[in-house]
Image (spheres, rainbow, N blue to C red):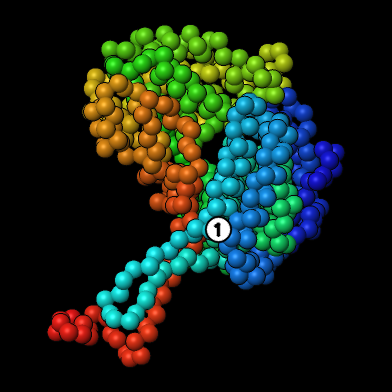
Amino acid sequence: MAAASELFTHFIGGRWVEGSGGRTFERRNPATGALVGTFAQGGPAEVDAAVAAAKSSFDSWRRYPAPRRGELLFRAGQLLLDRKEQLAREMTEEMGKVLSEARGDVQEAIDMAFYMAGEGRRMSGQTVPSEMRDKFQMSVRKPLGVCGVVTPWNFPMAIPSWKIFPALIAGNTVVFKPASATPRMAIRFVEALEEAGVPAGVVNLVLGTGAEVGDAIVAHPDVPLVTFTGSTATGTDVAVRGAELNKRVSLEMGGKNAVIVMDDADLALATDGILWSAFGTAGQRCTAASRVVVHRAVQRELVERLVARVGGMRLGDGLDETVDVGPLVSARQLETVAEYVSVGKREGARLAAGGEVVREGALAQGHFHQPTVFDDARPGMRIAQEEIFGPVTALIPVDSLGEAIDVVNGVPYGLSASIFTADVNRAFRAMQDIFTGILYVNAGTTGAEIHLPFGGTKATGNGHREAGTAALDFFTEWQSIYVDYSGKLQRAQIDPVEGTGTI
């Protein structure tokens, strides 16, 4: 384990290595500007070495009994649990989310380790009756080989766990490229797997940029499957290149999530849900609620409640447990959010709260933006259509549930939505008609649990799901097996069934 003053390196073939180029990059705390660490910068040469190690290890790893693979994941999960507080603090230092959220991020990885470890003993196929006598048939799952894993910075423990743990339990090997903003958390994740006893070459880590490392993974001929979470633009490019190379590709991309607040809603509860969904992780979640579709009958009261609460939210270093909202991850992301606030003003939405970059006092050293609420937005506005990925939400007034559902569905994305209502009929209509991968009733748009499928519709993804048993579908290939013990050739759909005269 590297000390803070040491160079953090790649992990290839069971060894921590600096790589061939000698290049490095720094990561700084987005709240304070303090140095988090210096990291080896990889490129195609390191990817080639990592893929070679993963390919060489695949045959022995796929033969390693799945229950034993599960035992290694149980050990890794326990190591993460033992280090939860340290990992949470390091996460806050590296990417900025407040400490309570960082603890939750680590806990999600712990949960996924234990959940997928259990799949080692119950990774099921099917046994079904044959239409022929004296014949047995079943289906089984098989791993595909080297899995390229490309992850973002906003959930630097949770998202790698969604991808790497199911890949491993299914018998695949891994080449992992984390976001350049969170390399230390990726190192901590891999350290746990190494210490748990995962064999050399089964998990490999290459640090560096998407242009050099990510592209090389996607293009590599010995990587048959790639799982990616990130922007829609990058994900679309990964899909195109993956299709050209006949790879299996899983994409988790953008979201433009909405909370519906009906006229019979518990407004205190709705306010809590909106604030958590819109401003948790400073709005830097694919499930963040950047739209609130509110019935006009309660619009004014809801706005007043939100403005009062937003005004009391404290910004600062997430290591301070009294802080509500941490920094944005980078100066670039801060500029993006500030530009969207300007767009909202130009489009005619009413700025009800926030709206400013914070540049005074201790916060001037970091990338802070006030939690921001727009009112009277229209469904076609850019702030109501495009992913902002920051602490900004916009209220869109409607007159009915039907109109609310149309507004929720009227964006390119389909990840998460929620509805606050006391009417069970309205709740079930929302469940029926809202076209998103995730839907909450009387809760915000965030908070998915690891034992149900996670993913979205439309431009949010390409149909695959992470978490739950559905996660195994991407990382395995089905094989159907027929065992004929009749001692004669039997032809399905052709030979008549004995004693019936029928086919």
Residue sitting at the far bottom: 488
Q: Is residue 411 above or below residue 248?
A: above
Depth order, front residue of 202/410: 202
Depth order, front residue of 47/432: 432
Q: Residues within 10 Å of mark 1 (few under 14, many from 20)?
A: many
Q: Is residue 401 left or right of residue 56?
A: left
Q: Is residue 23 above or below residue 408?
A: below
State the image coordinates of residue 91 (x, y, percent, origin top left).
68, 34
Q: Amino acid at mark 1?
A: Gly
Q: Is residue 79 above or below residue 485?
A: above
Residue appearing at x 36%, y 90% in the figure: 487
Depth order, front residue of 68/368: 68
The quarter of the displayed image where residue 58 is located? bottom right
Q: Which residue is mark 1?
A: 120
Q: Is residue 245 left or right of residue 212?
A: left
Judge whether residue 114 can be spotted in this image. Answer: yes
Q: Quadrant of the C terminus?
A: bottom left
Q: Is residue 3 left or right of residue 458?
A: right
Residue appearing at x 39%, y 38% in the figure: 438
| Numbered label tally | 1
Q: Is residue 58 above or below residue 411?
A: below
State the image coordinates of residue 89 (x, y, percent, origin top left).
71, 31
The quarter of the displayed image where residue 320 is located? top right
Residue appearing at x 85%, y 38% in the figure: 5
Residue sitting at the far left: 501
State the image coordinates of residue 279 (x, y, percent, origin top left).
52, 23
Secondary structure state at the residue bearing disc 1: loop
